[in-house]
Image (cartoon, rainbow, N blue to C red):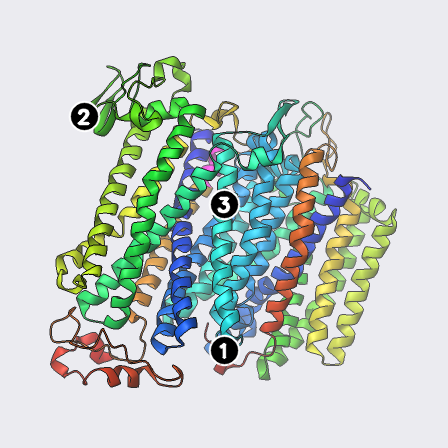
Amino acid sequence: MDALTLARLQFGFTVGFHFLFAPLSIGLSLILVIAEHRYYKSGRLTDKQAADFWLKLLVATVAIGVATGIPMEFSFGTNWSNYSRFVGDVFGFPLAAEGLLAFFLESTFIGVLIFGRKRVSRGFYYASAWLVLIGAHLSALWILIANSWQQTPAGYKIVNGKAELDNVWAAIINHSTVGRVLHTIFASWTIGAFFAAAICAYYILKGRHLDFAHRALPIALTVGLVSTVMMPIIGDIQARTVVDHQPAKLAAMEGVFHTGSDQPANIIGWVDESAQKVIGLKFPGGLSLLISGRTSQSVTGLNAFPKRDWPPLQTVFQSYHLMVSLGVLLILVALLGIYYAWRKRLAYHRWFLYLLLPVAILPWIATESGWVTAEVGRQPWVVYGLMRTSQAASPSVSATQIGLTLTLFVLLYALLFLAYVWVMVGIIRKGPQQGAAAPASVRPGVPAPGRASSPGRTASGHGLPSSLEALGQTPAPGPGTLSPREVSR
Amino acid sequence: MSLQLVWFVLIGLIAAIYAATDGYDLGVGVLYPFLARNDAERGVLRQTIGPVWDGNEVWLLVFGGALFGTFPVAYAVALSAFYLAIMLVLFGLILRAVSLEFRSHSSGALGLLWDTAFFVGSLLPALLFGVAVGDVVRGVKLGPSMAGQPGNYAGSFFSLLHPYALLVGVTGLTAFVLMGATWAAFKSDGELQARAARAASWAQALLVALFVLTTVYTALDSSAKAQLSDGLGRAAGWVALAVLVAGLAYGRWAMLAKNDGRAFLGAMVTVLGLVAVGGAGLYPNLTRALTTPGSVAVTTHNASASHLTLTVMLVFALVALPVVIAYQVYVHRLFSGRVRSEDVEY
């Protein structure tokens, strides 16, 4: 393989891997703030345990997110030096701003969260959780400002063959910034929400940490519903931007070859590039309707562009439709869950709880597909319409060097992934109520009468060992109802 | 004073703060297998840096972002020139970050694996940063300039491992070890503290010897000697040297007085002085070029971003840097005091 292909593979792999963890840490920071808020208000031991539990999951995720984010900051110089020379004047400052204005907040105050529970006041601790959340979100903001500029460059002029900053605000709030930032943040919340929901469902199915799980599950489902419903609304705004500023990308997303009105929206399909058509299930006039409100709206087809300016059609089409289908599915799951939660029937629909376990993977797949749609859809440009990806790599770095480091990245990241999963599973297995055998009810998953609704609040919330509190709420469970793991603790 | 000079100083300052903060936690990582004799002591050492290393490391990211934004050509040329070295640094930092967070969930063989990853992940950056500085100072082989702009790197990976660069690398490593040892002495107690204080004393003596050796080598090397004349030809060079000497003297006095906090402060000033000495000699270059026909060095002028970008970034920096420094100092104070083995939760 040539150096360019290897460099692209390396960037795609490292950023795609990083993008598994960065959104989860954003989503979990929200779940953590909600939990810290409850604890700050109630002072209850169980709320503290819940917050500590989310914090542990967040810390492990942030650790791997930070570790895999560091190479990205330097990759533009190491692997894409021609790109850096060309765009440095515009592209560098958002990256610097991310570090200065966002990343410092997150990394400094997560230190306070990990080690500061006994050292700072409750108010300061609660504020630190907010600062971590704000840092994580600002981080996404600045990185996506830089990314949006690649997609829809604005606020620059070309001087001596280089992009030079001309209007700061136009570059920052370029045509696709707002939509992309909101879309990605809601995607991150979706990942966090369904991840949290799956953990709660697992506890209810196992009959462990029921109090915790019954409280957190409706919250997770609410966050999940709000964010999944927001996605198509924002997606629609984004689609209109793509029509205006990246028409070839839009044509590839829906497989439009011939310019014309009444363009259908595909529900599922296969792009036949040689026959210049899409085979599959369509909603007539849907695309025209979505981007303008009228089916008579004309959409520019791929044939309006020279073939060397086409993105890889099948990849863009399939990733886009996968993302949309999964998004719809997630809305339905969240709706059903909210309905069951509202009727207080969640624990009785065990099939639904089982469903939540694999569903937690889907927001990740949807998010990565959305990323593929955006970035592969941008090809063959590294900066849309200004610089081709093929011109962007480092001339002085050989294929051998990139091949070597790519291999090391794959090995190292595989190790990290295993370690991460192992740590997360360990934290989840231990659960929020450490040291206390979780009370098991007669039928696992169904709250014992009067328990879930009366979460024995203690006067101070402090000083009462969790085991006593658990025992205070339920009769000591008989040995027959305990799983071997619970006995061993 | 031109904006380019302001940014040269600011980037130097960011590099110096990075070296003086992440330096001590890298140093703790390098000393980790040698200072700690058992699991409890290892836990103490990790805990001393646990709350702060992440925030310290962000200075490196800010350095990268600020260099990219203000001197994009330097970012492009230097990072692609040091390709493999930078990748090794990055692999090291990744291993280290993850090992620190995951170590507390592991024991036995897995614990040993993370301990090793922590050591190796600290050693690689601590050594290679200095090697890169050595190359930047002495000069690297650059291709012919393109439209007045410096060309791309034209040498091999192994030509970066010049003895001069290696010597600067070992000097930098020793400086980080000095910081790590004084930090460990400041933050621990009992036998661990005594061992760390002895290590700090030796590291400082070694650092002085290596610095003198590097200076002599610089004066004798036909490529590197520009560093000496450029630096000492300016008041800034003498000030930087004075800061370095003051840091060393203050640190030695504090060690003799058995004041661990001040010894650490002395080590911090020493490292700030070292970065300043390097920066004063380098200006206006960002990366020197070895003399080959048609090539030019990367300087603050031919590598700089536009006036507007430099101004915008200066506004960001002037607003954000004092705030960041303030809350980082605050968090360091929050976690002041010695870590005892019964406090270890990391």
| Rendered image: mark on residue A118 | 1
| Rendered image: mark on residue A141 | 3
Q: Secondary structure at mark 1?
A: loop
Q: From mark 1 to mark 2, how far is it between C-alphas?
A: 60 Å
Residue at point 73%, 76% (across, down)? B255
Residue B303 seen in the figure? no
Chain letter of the residue carrying label 3: A
Q: Return the residue nearer the eye: A442 or B219.
A: A442
Residue at point 76%, 58% (across, down)? B273
| Rendered image: mark on residue B238 | none
Look at label 3 and name its amino acid. Leu
Look at label 2 and name its amino acid. Gly
Q: Which residue is mark 2?
A: A280
User: Is residue B226 placed above or below A310 in the rendered structure?
Assistant: below
Q: Return the residue nearer the eye: A367 or A38.
A: A38
Query: Residue A446 at what x, y percent from top left?
Result: 15, 69
Q: Secondary structure at mark 3?
A: helix
Q: Which residues fall within the magenta stretch?
A: A398-404
Classed neighbour count for the residue bearing mark 1: other residues with Cα under 10 Å, few (<14), some (14–19), many (≥20): few
B170 drawn magenta:
no
| Number of on-image labels | 3
Q: From mark 2 to mark 3, how far is it between C-alphas?
A: 37 Å
Query: Residue A261 at what x, y percent from top left?
Result: 30, 16
Q: From mark 1 to mark 3, how far is it between C-alphas?
A: 32 Å
